[in-house]
Amino acid sequence: MPLNIPSEPLSIRVEPLGYFYGLPITGTMVMFMVELLLFGILFIAVSKFRVEKPGKFQILVEMIFETIQGLIKQISGSDEIAKRVLPLITSLIILILTSDIVLTFLPFLSGFTYEGATIFRSHTNDFNTTFALAVISVVAAQIFSVIKLTPFNYIFRYIKVKQVVLSFKKGIKEGFMSLIDAFIGVLDIISEFAKMISLSLRLFGNMFAGELLQGVLMSIFAIALPLPIMGLSLLSGVIQAVVFGSLVTSYLAGALSENI
């Protein structure tokens, strides 16, 4: 039987379970489908909420959404901006939290393998997924910026040819100063790509290290300390979800509040 539950530590490399018309199918994709199913069940449950008779589950969900909305408003400093970015930020935070909650309370899932490949792997422990989330976040900020500034002004925010030409018309000193400003514009382009790397590496590194540490500690103290270890892992996941959402919120708020 190729299906087993080994005790090897979690590996950074994501081995494919198989291929579908040349597309590799990984444990990350399988876990993501499980989480989508959980999302579907949650949304169905939320859609049946009744305001006149709120239950404990409804109150809990509303508290979570209100907390996220308050965090976004505090970071952005604007109700209008908070309403515009709320769906994206909430989705990102809940997506990260769901992944952490599933593998915190069901840690044995990461031990199931098929022909040496992990069947259920948290998507936050796969750099491909965290990088994709970072790219989506930064690209969304750029789209908001284009809408805010118009495409023409957005391009010349980074490529400051117009500013250089106008500055040289005023004088040599102003022209050379504008060249420095133009070079800073090039650095701004590089910084946008750097945001993708920093966001993805921060989330991936912390979540991967957290799950690896949890697996090691539970293998040593499986009888004495299971609940504290699980609680620590859950707390770490909540913190990383909030940090990731806060950083993305700051990027989006900056794009929506900038002027020409």
Image (tube, helix red, strand yellow):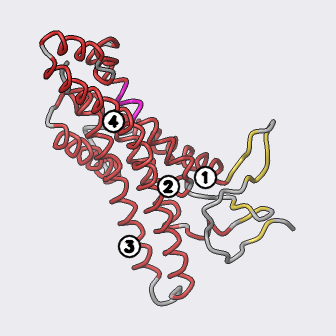
How busy is the neighbourhood of tag 4: few (under 14 within 10 Å), some, or many (20 plus)? Answer: few
Q: Which residue is rendered at x = 13% and y = 15% of the image?
A: 171
The mark that comes first in sequence, 2 or 4, is 2
Span highlighted in magenta in the image: 138-142
Q: Nearer the viewer, mark 4 or mark 1?
A: 4
Residue 124 bears which disc, if any?
Answer: none
* Amino acid type assigned to the residue bearing label 3 in the image: Leu
Q: Earlier in the sequence, mark 4 or mark 3?
A: 4
Question: Looking at the picture, which amino acid does disc 2 mark?
Answer: Ser
**Amino acid at dot 1:** Met
By secondary structure, the bulk of the magenta-drawn segment is best described as: helix
Secondary structure type for disc 3 = helix
Judged left or right of residue 245, residue 112 is: right
> Dot 1 corresponds to which residue?
31
Q: CA distance from mark 3 to mark 1?
A: 22 Å
Seen from the viewer's position, the closer of residues 176 and 192 is 176
**Among all residues in the image, which is located at the extreme right?**
1
The numbered mark, 1 or 2, whose residue comes first in the sequence reads 1
Residue 99, which numbered label?
Answer: 2
| Label placed on residue 232 | 3
Marks 2 and 4 sit apart, C-alpha to C-alpha, by: 35 Å
Disc 4 to disc 3, C-alpha distance: 39 Å
Quarter location, residue 65: top left
Q: How many other residues sit within 10 Å of disc 2, few (<14), some (14-19) or many (≥20)?
A: many
Secondary structure beneath dot 4 equals helix
First along the sequence among labels 4 and 1: 1
